[in-house]
Amino acid sequence: MKKYKIFLVVDGRATPKDDNRMWLKNLYEPLVALGHKVVLFDIADFENKHEVSCMSPEAKELLSNELPIYFDQANQEYEFDIFLSYLHTKQIHPDAYGQIAKQLYTINYSTNFHQFDIYKDISKHANLNLFATKIAKDGYDKLGVKSYWMPFAANEEFCASSEVKNDKVVFIGSAYGYRPYLFWRALQLGVDLNIYGVGWLKDFKSIKEKLVNKKGLLRLIVDLPSITSINRRLIKFDQYNREAIIRKINLDFPEAINNAVSDVDYFKIISEAAIVLNIQSARYNFDVLNPHVLFGTNLRDFEITARGSFLLSQHSEEMGELFNVGSEVVTYHDEFDLAEKAKYYLKHGSEREEIAKRGHERCLRDHTWKKRFDDLFFYIDKLV
């Protein structure tokens, strides 16, 4: 297969943790390992150098102005075949992307289709738009642009399986959307769940803070009549309800919640856990008024199976296309199904371990980033 000269633009961070460079490991390192010549432009390093906040207006203006210049200089030296990016319009102006797209074959990766609006203007400039969730194809087809389904995958560097498992049920991820409600109910239903991530841990140690929180609730109730828009009231209530549930978890199940963890600790936790939960659903644009919810797979589905751990994930048609549900992974439909299956598989260790073993084998065979890029470039070779 042809080896390409690639200019790669990516924000290496997958989470707000400063030491996180997961997307470099997922995209940059596999490309290099496959023998491609890759020149990296890391947005995280760029923003740190210029002392601007992630996705701030200042960062967007700087990147829009300087990336085309930096690319032109590098292209004079390397004469790239492909400009590969993981960009959206909160990071760069579409016209700036278009300047680069006029010069060579451009590919842009979009992973958050529930936020499709931030990708669509760039997609009109790209020669090929990669999407991680299969349902995104309809959106790109409506725009009349070329697209290619490239699901998430696992990094082979993190595919070692731990032979020793504890008896923990864990989830690692941020506290947004439906997640607080789902895991609150799971805890109420008796699942001994351990949660790690941004936004879960709240400090309720001082009486003063409790009073402030009560005043905050009172202020919300008093202010509601002044909010004339029904839509705004619903949005406010949604925000408050989610925050109230997180606080309720903190008060009733303080032992269940933990702060965000580093990459090293993340893989250690999921590798050693008996059961690792996942939830992928996200309401479009995180808008409570929008009736559409995206279901699919996300990065954790592959990271968990890559570590040889038992995956109990939210059910979706896409999951069934990538794994054999029931044989390689197990899925749940709601909080009751989640609680029932978590308890069952904790008690049936041999059955759980066999499923985890088959999921691990499937992930290593079909779902690594190297495999994804080999398939992508085979597809591109046929196009150009």
Image (cartoon, grey):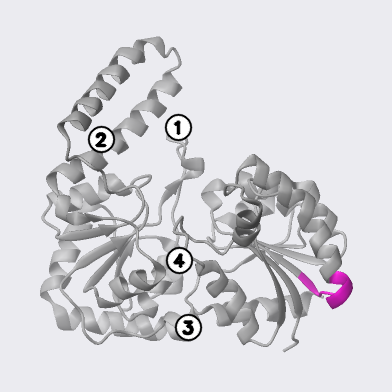
Q: Name which quarter of the figure residue 343 lies in.
A: bottom left
Disc 3 target residue: 156
Residue 289 is marked as 1
Whichever of labels 2 and 1 marks the residue nearer the N terminus, that label is 2
Which mark's residue is nearer the viewer, 2 or 1?
Answer: 2
Q: In which quarter of the image is the N terminus?
A: bottom right
Amino acid on which disc 4 is placed: Leu
From mark 4 to mark 2, how far is it between C-alphas?
Answer: 28 Å
Callout 3: SS: helix
Q: Name which quarter of the figure residue 170 lies in.
A: bottom left
Callout 4: SS: helix
From mark 2 to mark 1, how far is it between C-alphas?
Answer: 19 Å
Amino acid on which disc 3 is placed: Glu
Whichever of labels 1 and 4 marks the residue nearer the N terminus, that label is 1
Whichever of labels 3 and 1 marks the residue nearer the N terminus, that label is 3
From mark 3 to mark 2, how far is it between C-alphas?
Answer: 40 Å
Callout 2: SS: helix
Mark 4 neighbour density, 10 Å: few (under 14) some (14–19) many (20 or more): some
Callout 1: SS: loop
Disc 2 target residue: 244
Q: Which of 36 and 374 is in front in this view?
A: 36
Q: Where is residue 239 in the image (x, y as percent from the top left)?
A: 36, 33
CB-based contact (under 8 Å), mark 3 and mark 1? no
From mark 3 to mark 4, how far is it between C-alphas?
Answer: 13 Å
Q: How many labels does the image show?
A: 4
First to last magenta residue range: 75-82
Residue 299 is marked as 4
Q: Is residue 17 left or right of residue 2?
A: left
Q: Residue at x 37, y 46 (%)?
A: 176
Residue 346 lies, with reference to residue 200, above or below; the image says below
Residue 312 in magenta stretch: no
